[in-house]
Image (cartoon, grey):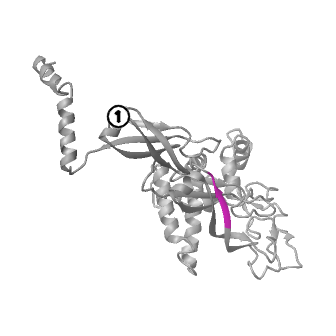
C-alpha cells in the first residue's frame, strides 16, 4: 500500500462513525461490526473476512488516542496531495519523510507511518515488522471474575505458515533482493521540479521477491488459523475490562516480534452478591427482635460462611463490614464484604405473636412520633 493509498482511507467511514465520535462510541461501533463480520460467524465468506480486516485496521488506529491524532493531522496535511518531495523557500530540497523521521524520535507522525507501512517510508527500513494486535471477548460468571480463572479462548486469526515458517517461499527456496529498489522497498520518480517517493511496486515495498511461492500461504508467510489458547484472567477483573496478553497476537513479519492479544471480559451477575469496586455487597434479612436485642448471624461469602455480630438497636439499612472477604486484588489482598441489614416485617401473625407485640408496644416508654407535632407547631 502506498502512502497516498493509506491517506485516502477514511477509517471513520469504515466504522460508520463521525470524526467527532468519542472513544466509547468508536469502541461500540467496532464491537458491533466485529461480531457481525467475524470469520467464525461467516465461515467461507471472503467478503466478510476482508471487511473484518478493514474494521480491525480502522479500530487499531482510531482506538489509540495518539495514533488517531496523528492520523487526523496526516490527512489534513496531505489533503492537497502534498506527499511529495520538493524545495523550500530557499530553494533547498526537502522531503516530508525527513519530517516523519524527525518526529519519529519524539513519537510523532513517523511512528504512525512506520507502523502502518511496515517501516518502508524511507529506504533501507524494510526490516522486521511487529505483528498486529488481536482482540477477542470472553464471558465469566461472577465468582470466576472475583477469584480469577484460566479460560480456553478459540481464536480465528492470522498465524505463521507452518510450511514456509513465515518466509513466503516454497520449502527449499529463499526470497531474493528486489533489483528495482535494491532491497530498500522504495523507488523515486522525477517529474520536472519535483520527485515522488513511494513503495516499490515490484516488491510491494518489502524489498524482496519470491520466485517460488509457498503453496499453502501463497507467498504471504501467514495463514488464517484457528487455535485454542489458555489464558489466565486475573482475580478482580471487572465487566468491560480489557486484558492484555503480551506476544499472543499476530506473528511479526521478517523476524519481527508478535503483536498482543486483548481480551474484553464480560461479567455475569449473581443472585446473592453485588459488587462495588473491590467490595462485595449483600443484603441480609433479620427479625425485629434480633435487630433490637442484638444477635449473631451467619453470612455467606465467596469461600464459605462467617459469623457477624449485629449490635443491639441496629436499624434497617445499616451496613456492617466484614474485612478481607471481598474481591481479590491484583496486587494482593482483597476488598471487604458489605452487609446491609434488612429488618423483615412479617405479613401475617398468629395470636401468640400478635399478643406479644401488643404487650411490647404497651411497654414502650414513649411515643416515638410525639416530637413531630411539637416541632411542626414551631415551624422553620
Residue 36, position as x, y percentages in the image: 49, 70
Compared with residue 311, is residue 217 higher up or lower down, i.e. above or below? below
| Camera-side residue of 256 and 280 | 280
Q: Which residues are magenta?
A: 229-234
Q: Is residue 232 magenta?
A: yes
- In this view, the residue farthest toward the right is 172
Residue 347, position as x, y percentages in the image: 22, 51
Dot 1: within a 10 Å radius of its alpha carbon, few (fewer than 14), some, or many (20 or more) residues? few
> Is 316 displayed left or right of 370 in the figure?
right
Compared with residue 163, is residue 282 higher up or lower down, i.e. above or below? above
| Camera-side residue of 138 and 120 | 138
Task: Please identify the quarter of the rendering in which residue 203 is found.
Answer: bottom right
The residue that disc 1 covers is 293
Q: Which residue lies at the image location 51% right of the left edge and 63% below the top edge?
A: 14
Give the quadrant of the N terminus.
bottom right
Task: Please identify the quarter of the rendering in which residue 144 is found.
Answer: bottom right
Q: Is residue 126 magenta?
A: no
Residue 193 appearing in the image: no
- Numbered circles on residues, count: 1
| Camera-side residue of 77 and 115 | 115
Residue 159 appearing in the image: yes
Task: Please identify the quarter of the rendering in which residue 358 is found.
Answer: top left
Give the quadrant of the C terminus.
top left
> Is 79 displayed left or right of 261 in the figure?
left
Identify the main secondary structure in magenta: strand
| Camera-side residue of 55 and 182 | 55
Residue 291, position as x, y percentages in the image: 34, 37
Q: Which residue lies at the image location 81% right of the left edge and 60% below the top edge?
A: 184
- In this view, the residue farthest toward the top is 378
The secondary structure type at the circle numbered 1 is helix
Amino acid at each position: 500500500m502506498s502512502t497516498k493509498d493509506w491517506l485516502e482511507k477514511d477509517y471513520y467511514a469504515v466504522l460508520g462513525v463521525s470524526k467527532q465520535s468519542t472513544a466509547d462510541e468508536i469502541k461500540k461501533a467496532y464491537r458491533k461490526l466485529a461480531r457481525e463480520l467475524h470469520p467464525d460467524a461467516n465461515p467461507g465468506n471472503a467478503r466478510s473476512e476482508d471487511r473484518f480486516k478493514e474494521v480491525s485496521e480502522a479500530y487499531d488506529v482510531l482506538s489509540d488516542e495518539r495514533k488517531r491524532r496523528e492520523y487526523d493531522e496526516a490527512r489534513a496535511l496531505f489533503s492537497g496531495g502534498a506527499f511529495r518531495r520538493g524545495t523550500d523557500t530557499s530553494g533547498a530540497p526537502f522531503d516530508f519523510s525527513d519530517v516523519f523521521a524527525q518526529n519519529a524520535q519524539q513519537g510523532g507522525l513517523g511512528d504512525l507511518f512506520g507502523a502502518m507501512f511496515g517501516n518502508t517510508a524511507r529506504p533501507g527500513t524494510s526490516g522486521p515488522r511487529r505483528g498486529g494486535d488481536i482482540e477477542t471477548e470472553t464471558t465469566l460468571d461472577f465468582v470466576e471474575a472475583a477469584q480469577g480463572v484460566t479460560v480456553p479462548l478459540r481464536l480465528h486469526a492470522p498465524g505463521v505458515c507452518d510450511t514456509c515458517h513465515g518466509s513466503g517461499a516454497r520449502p527449499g527456496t529463499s526470497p531474493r533482493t528486489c533489483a528495482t529498489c535494491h532491497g530498500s522497498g522504495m523507488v523515486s520518480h522525477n517529474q520536472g521540479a519535483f520527485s515522488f517517493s513511494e513503495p516499490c511496486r515490484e516488491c510491494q515495498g518489502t524489498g524482496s521477491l519470491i520466485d517460488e511461492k509457498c503453496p499453502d500461504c501463497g507467498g504471504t508467510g501467514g495463514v488464517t488459523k484457528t487455535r485454542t489458547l489458555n489464558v489466565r484472567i486475573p482475580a478482580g477483573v471487572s465487566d468491560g475490562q480489557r486484558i492484555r496478553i503480551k506476544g499472543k497476537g499476530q506473528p511479526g513479519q521478517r523476524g519481527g516480534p508478535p503483536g498482543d492479544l486483548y481480551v474484553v471480559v464480560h461479567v455475569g451477575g449473581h443472585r446473592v452478591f453485588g459488587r462495588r469496586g473491590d467490595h462485595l455487597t449483600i443484603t441480609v434479612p433479620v427479625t425485629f427482635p434480633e435487630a433490637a436485642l442484638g444477635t449473631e448471624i451467619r453470612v455467606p461469602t465467596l469461600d464459605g460462611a462467617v459469623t457477624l455480630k449485629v449490635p443491639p438497636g441496629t436499624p434497617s439499612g445499616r451496613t456492617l463490614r466484614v474485612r478481607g472477604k471481598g474481591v481479590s486484588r491484583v496486587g494482593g489482598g482483597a476488598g471487604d464484604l458489605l452487609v446491609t441489614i434488612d429488618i423483615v416485617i412479617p405479613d401475617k401473625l398468629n395470636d401468640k405473636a400478635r399478643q406479644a407485640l401488643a404487650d411490647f408496644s404497651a411497654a414502650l416508654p414513649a411515643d416515638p412520633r410525639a416530637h413531630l407535632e411539637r416541632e411542626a407547631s414551631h415551624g422553620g
